[in-house]
Amino acid sequence: MNICVALGGNPNAGKTTLFNALTGSRQHVGNYPGVTVDRKEGRYVQNGHDIHIVDLPGTYSLTAYSVEEVVARDFLVNECPRVTINIVDASNLERNLYLTIQLLELGIPICVALNMIDVARSRGIEIDHQKLSRLLGVPVVPIMARSGFGKQALMAAVERVAQQPLPQPLRVSYGRDLETTIQSMEQVITKHGFLTDLYPARWIALKYLENDAQILEKGRATEARIADQLVAETQKVGAHIEETLETYPEAMIADHRYGFISSMLKQGIVKERFDKNRLFLSDRIDKVLVNRFAGPLIMFLVLFGLYQLVFTYSEVPVGWCETVFEWLSDVVSTQMPDGLLKSLIVSGVIDGVGGVLGFVPLIMFMFLGIAVLEDSGYLARVAFMLDRIFQIFGLHGSSVMAYIVSGGIAGGCAVPGVMATRTLRSPKERIATLLTAPFMNCGAKLPVFALLIAAFFPNSQARMMFLITLISWSGALLAAKFLRLTVVKGPSTPFVMELPPYRLPTFRGLMIHTWERTWQYVKKAGTVILGISILLWAAMTFPRLPAAQVAQYAADRDHMVAQASPAITDELARWTGDTPLSAGAARLKRELTASRGRQSAAALRYSLAGRIGGGLEVVSRWAGFDWRTNIALLGGFAAKEVIVSTLGTAYSLGAANDDDAQASIASRLTAEPGWRVLTAWSMIVFVMFYAPCFVTIVSIVRESSWRWGLFSVIFNTSLAFCVSVGIYQVGSLLGY
Ligand code: GDP
Ligand code: MG
């Protein structure tokens, strides 16, 4: 075997010493072309293998800040050493690993030499190198360069690495703001093969964000149009971060890299025998907040407090919104002549979109709460703490982030959640995560739950929401375990996650983050949901009841009026609604509205949607859903937001009388004889677990394959149905 091995590390990590120990007299010094940086090369012979070793200049990073860094990086990229030995000062591990992370991000094969263990030991630092090796995914060999201890073991590890295939570049996750940009830049870079012959796509994107002079120049020289596009994206996210977090991308990237390291080191890799009182503030806070015992308890209280706050404070503005929409539909109902147009505007547009927009204050409060947790850095700690539980279910610490983004705390979206699974290194854990992340309670399911809770559990709203969240997590975890035991079987991989330092969220940052996410929701209601609402309205209106039947209902009513005495019909005709009616007139009025209700119910049943919903009733009856609920659930396939609005439309179209049609959806449901607490439970669980919405399915397909997309539809819907049937049937048996 004849291979080239590079030797890289921070200045003073002991590179030269190791180089000398390995090569002895078989070395010579040259120059890197064009720069006055020494290039030392030498030979190491082991078991008849001839290994060519190059001592790189010492660097702290691989961004082009100095000549040394450019030289080291160019050597690694252009001359492709088969293995790079990364020499690390064990007495200063955290700082030294910063370079290690960047080597891993560059996707080159490395082997870590943990040097100066004598110094570390004398300072009372003990390092679990096996665990470190597991977490980094590369060999870590303890050595003492000065005495030559460990050099055979190191070179044996180098040979092992040389025989393995090239590794995948490490993907550190850089927080939601940057991550979105990085991923979109990655796509552009991959699509155009922009510099990808030299560097991994993600790495190029990072260098653009880090403002790396050399890469910027190379980029411009290669394809100016794409370079400009990448620079524009960089500037955009830069401005955004400046505004929201008052920092800049380079600093954020460094923060997350250090966060990655610190979360690794927090897992008992470094044992310090003497407390040297050098804990930074973040570390000190973490002593309490991620404490083994206090941590989970605090987390539980924080999350529960969040629900309490959101539901208490949003009650009033949600009430205002409902009033506005009720008033609007009132005005339109009385001002417009009866007919298709009125039905479209009242049932299709106002009820549909209003049902969604009515929850904007609640969603806004929830987003605000999440922004506080996220911007302060606490959310990452939540993921860190939940990792231990996740391992039990065959998932990974990074899955937590995907869950939370999907709405694990309530009010997220499965689409970015599915994309967040990209940080998972093991493909099997990744599939299990992206299939179960849609079980979380996204911002679109939230209104459905809020509605059912308001209707059936009015006195325990926050508690119910918390319970629902627990159910969805348990469901997701159990489903993941099931998947990991069956279709995606395999061992679990160790956990490393970013723990960026705590920071005090800024008011401005919170407002912007809250507003952005709320606005996305409103925009969706204004466009997609409006479109789907109108389509569903059409499906619920056409084909229209045959004229003969309409005439029959009208004739019935004429008959009722004819039967009544002239005094009563006269009283009813002159009635303005201010004075109480006489008993006879009230009865006639009731009968007339009941007849109108029967007619609109028959019309809905006759429509396309009614027929489909009715056809499904055979099956859905088991879970307690009638045909109107079926229509809403079918609409939910397109977008979950539609469920509430469709329920609204279905029950207002089929409402038994005018007063009911104007009551809020919640009170309409409670008044419905087919609806009881058990039905609400069955529906909550079904909505929680059934097929992801269309956009999520598309993302799943994009992130994996169409098979998994199809699988998620079938698996989730069957699961949801079984659980709902179970709840409804057992509950009915027990007499609820
Ligand atoms: P470079 O800058 O990475 O080339 O580092 P050097 O090889 O010049 O080493 C820096 C200092 O660390 C020198 O004084 C070495 O003698 C010392 N050194 C290197 N390896 C060890 C070791 O394993 N133990 C101890 N105690 N000192 C070491
Ligand atoms: Mg040196």
Image: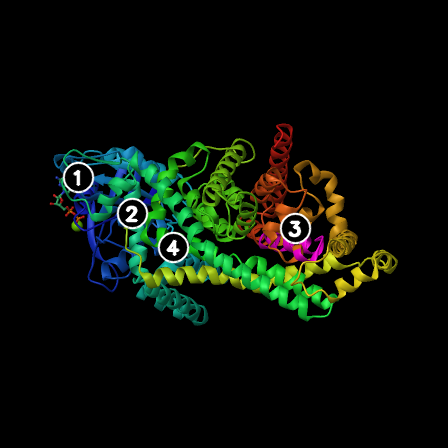
The span shown in magenta is 639-659
- Where's the C terminus, which quadrant? top right
Q: Nearer the viewer, mark 2 or mark 3?
A: 3
**Of the residues under marks 3 and 1, which one precedes in the sequence?**
1
Q: Which residue is mark 1?
A: 116
Q: Nearer the viewer, mark 2 or mark 4?
A: 4
Q: Is mark 3 within 8 Å of ligand 1?
A: no
**Of the residues under marks 2 and 3, which one precedes in the sequence?**
2
Magenta residues, dominant SS class: helix
Q: Is mark 1 within 8 Å of ligand 1?
A: yes
Q: Is residue 665 left or right of residue 312?
A: right
Q: Nearer the viewer, mark 4 or mark 3?
A: 3
Q: Which residue is mark 2?
A: 100
**Of the residues under marks 4 and 1, which one precedes in the sequence?**
1
**Of the residues under marks 4 and 3, which one precedes in the sequence?**
4
Q: Is mark 2 within 8 Å of ligand 1?
A: no
Label 1 SS: loop
Q: Which residue is mark 4?
A: 371
Q: Which residue is mark 3?
A: 632
Three-letter amino acid code of the residue under disc 3: Ala
Q: Is residue 647 magenta?
A: yes
Three-letter amino acid code of the residue under disc 1: Met
Pick the front one: 589 or 11:
589
Label 3 SS: helix
Within-10-Å neighbours for mark 2: few <14, some 14–19, many 20+: many
Q: CA distance from mark 2 to mark 3?
A: 53 Å
Q: Nearer the viewer, mark 3 or mark 1?
A: 3
Instruction: Tell me what residue is drawn at x 70 percent, y 67 percent.
Output: 342
Q: Nearer the viewer, mark 4 or mark 1?
A: 4
Where residue 64 sits: x, y (%)? Answer: 28, 61
